[in-house]
Image (cartoon, rainbow, N blue to C red):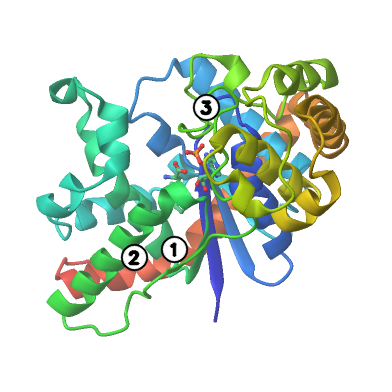
Amino acid sequence: MSRIFSGIQPTGNLHLGNYLGAVRNWVRLQHDYESIYCVVDLHAITVWQEPAELRRAIREVTAILIAAGIDPKKNIVFNQSQNPDHAQLAWIFNCVARLGWLNRMTQFKEKAGKDRENASVGLYSYPNLMAADILAYKATHVPVGEDQKQHLELARDIAQKFNNDFGVPGFFPLTEPLILGEATRVMSLRDGAKKMSKSDPSDYSRINLTDDADAIAQKIRKAKTDPEPLPSEPAGLEARPEAKNLVVIYAALADTTVAAVLREVGGQQFSAFKQRLADLCVEKLGPIAGEMNRLIADTAYLDAVLRDGAGRARALSRPILDEVMDIVGFVRA
Ligand code: AMP
Ligand code: TRP
């Protein structure tokens, strides 16, 4: 049977990249698969989080997921720390994964930066926890943006090594990434070489899912482009990363392809195209922000969703963890 798992960090500033690369695909997949969507608060604390802000962000992300169209009755929506099975399996995976594997992870290198000695140990072993998130449910498919591909390959390596070492072929599935849509890597609005990111110090680099219509329009108007008009074919965007990014965003929001967009707008100046893009962004994101603002006020409802989700998640993971404990040789007396 197929089972979907995916996670998102509650670290503020959910943006258009999170939406097009992940959340929108989750909304679409929920009808075809048994789906588990997790607010990964244990991953969030791999870098310092102010406790009050973390608490707020966990509820805000939950509200955004529901506002974007995820049905928490049909699916499981919960925060990671409420199911201890993730952390328990992650410890076992700390003992399966090899240092050499983690040393290759580019996200750690980016996030730790130059001051690597001062990064938390959690930031380093982050991908092992991510593998545990997925494999605690034996999830078969994981919808994510392109930046998570390397981590998912590591999850496969861990599954395979566990299965081999303990002589349990096929126990953990080799999970498939689902990297879907036109916009699997949305870039910064200020720099076409950098991905749109929650942690970019410039708010003008991203469109937040909480931005109002004015903020969206202003950010798109100020987005970096080049002086050339739009080309008529995708090849004409190749050496123009900022221009390409805006067209990709438009195509994804309009649910069409880059080629189809260019057939329509090829030859236009960017000023006119930016106006269309802003209107489309407001049309698609505005209702999500509105619903999110309504939900965020209802802490009792959001907490009830998370509590219910955590209970249902644990009911799925516990039997798998029990089996893992037996396989490893622990005594469950
Ligand atoms: P994070 O914000 O790191 O918790 O990421 C949550 C999800 O959003 C993951 O599936 C990421 O791959 C996806 N994502 C984050 N940034 C981008 C981006 N700039 N473009 C596309 N997908 C993204
Ligand atoms: N590392 C992912 C990110 O930053 C979030 C994440 C944690 C995740 N656990 C996961 C994604 C399990 C998919 C599956 O985007």
Q: Are marks 2 and 3 in contact (CB under 8 Å)?
A: no
In the image, 239: left or right of 71?
left
* Residue under pointer 1: 317
Label 3 CB less than 8 angstroms from ligand 1: yes
Q: Earlier in the sequence, mark 3 or mark 1?
A: 3
Residue 76 at what x, y percent from top left? 62, 56
Disc 2: CA contacts within 10 A as few (<14), some (14-19) or many (>=20): some
SS for tag 2? helix
- Kind of residue sitting beneath label 2: Leu
- The front one of 87 and 255 is 255
- Kind of residue sitting beneath label 1: Ser
Nearest-to-viewer mark from 2 and 3: 3
Observer able to see residue 277: yes
Q: Are marks 1 and 2 in contact (CB under 8 Å)?
A: yes
Q: Earlier in the sequence, mark 2 or mark 3?
A: 3
- Kind of residue sitting beneath label 3: Lys
- The front one of 82 and 227 is 227
Work out which quarter of the rendered image holds the N terminus and state it. Answer: bottom right
Vertical comparison of 115 with 2: above or below: above
* Residue under pointer 3: 198
Cα distance in 3D space between marks 3 and 1: 30 Å
Residue 263 at what x, y percent from top left? 81, 53
Residue located 61% across and 44% down the image: 237
SS for tag 1? helix
Could you say which quadrant of the image residue 284 lies in? top right
Label 1 CB less than 8 angstroms from ligand 2: no
Residue located 46% across and 33% down the image: 193
Could you say which quadrant of the image residue 35 lies in? bottom right
Disc 1: CA contacts within 10 A as few (<14), some (14-19) or many (>=20): some
Residue 321, label in figure = 2
In the image, 84: left or right of 298?
left
